[in-house]
Amino acid sequence: MKTFKSVFELYNWDSIQSKIYQTTSKDVECALSKTKRNLDDFLVLISPIAQNYLEQMAQECHDITKKRFGKTIQMYAPLYLSNECQNICTYCGFSLDNKIKRKTLSDTEIKLEVEALKNLGFDHVLLVTGEANYTVNITYFLNAIALIRKEFSIISVEVQPLSTEDYERLHEAGVYSVLVYQETYHQEVYKKYHTKGKKSNFDYRLETPDRIGTAGMHKIGLGVLLGLEDWRTDSFFNALHLDYLQKKYWQTKYSVSFPRLRPAEGIIEPNFIMDDKDLTQLICAYRLWNEDLEISISTRENEKFRNNIIPIGVTSMSAGSKTNPGGYVVDPQSLEQFEISDERSAKEIAQIITNSGYEPVWKDWDKIYSHKEKSIEVLK
């Protein structure tokens, strides 16, 4: 089966980076004059020179998002099930070489965490684990989903890459979307960050979204870990990946997230600093390029940035997040994957969204329009 790898191999990191940094004002103005933009325009809009046009970009970004998604922000919360991991990754608090207390939630503990999230009002949960195939595997995932399926309208997962067959099983069990991050598309240095474990296999991870798409998952979320390598070049390759997926698996919805390196136990310092203005530019570039793309901002970001980004292009936000297994009630002191920056409660975030003239949405009603469920729902 042809995968994204065949497209990826047509591009060179250094050549793309050079094109981005050689962009001129004339190139930016040309891209902004268009009503429909392609990947070449996205490359131009993430260039350093495009920051001079950020106010214009942000205004159009606001208008497009309002037209396409309305004045709504969808709310979700991560539920960390385990911090066990067999990979050694230099940037992650869950890395195998970190001497920390490992914890995987039991059935009873999962139910307690779920009860806490429901009491906070959440109806969309993102299940997150480390990558420990012998402990947190497809059997564990299916069991956890069976325990919580009736409690949430939307269940998303962010776990280790799986086979197509396993993604089919997750989909049938009730999983709505799968998030998977390549971390960096800079293949030459990828091994430097992923020194041991299955995650060190660049190609296997690169082809994961193809397996998810083949399995018929309703939504796929991509992103890169901003801070490992040049964010502009990495983001171009992430957009290239999204472009490929949207054309091949056209019935699937897509989202993009923007994880910036945050402090965590035993991790490296960012190699490339990305400030708030840079991230605003990147969000705008994605929206101006792709009107249908869902854009998510997590509690990694600080309060001021999250407040200000609401009216620009975001469609979903996490709130009150705990990034450690059992962090809501079971074991609040267990090790976090990374430190959150916005520590406000879900209720506070919802009020901020409302005060901004937007509506916090706790349930994704789009689920009934899944291409696999649509005919059934219509008949009902």
Image: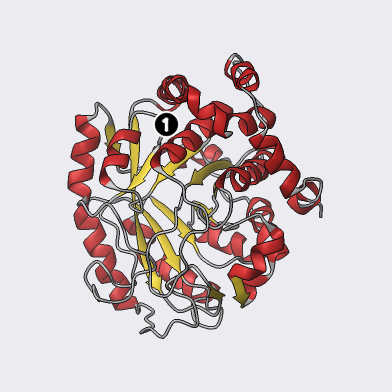
Q: Quadrant of the N terminus?
A: bottom right
Q: Is residue 59 above or below residue 273?
A: above
Q: Amino acid at mark 1?
A: Gly
- Residue at the extreme top of the image, as rendered: 33
Image location of residue 19, percent across then percent down: 70, 36
In front: 40, or 377? Answer: 40
Q: Is residue 69 above or below residue 158?
A: above
| Colour option used | secondary structure
Residue sitting at x 48%, y 34%:
281
Q: Is residue 24 above or below residue 265?
A: above
Q: What crowding class fits label 1: few (fewer than 14 Cα within 10 Å), some (14-19), or many (20 or more)? A: many
**In the displayed structure, does residue 177 sit left or right of residue 348?**
right
Residue sitting at x 77%, y 48%:
12
Image location of residue 10, percent across then percent down: 81, 46
Image location of residue 204, percent across then percent down: 70, 65
Residue 348 visible in the current orientation: yes
Which residue is labeled 1 in the image? 313
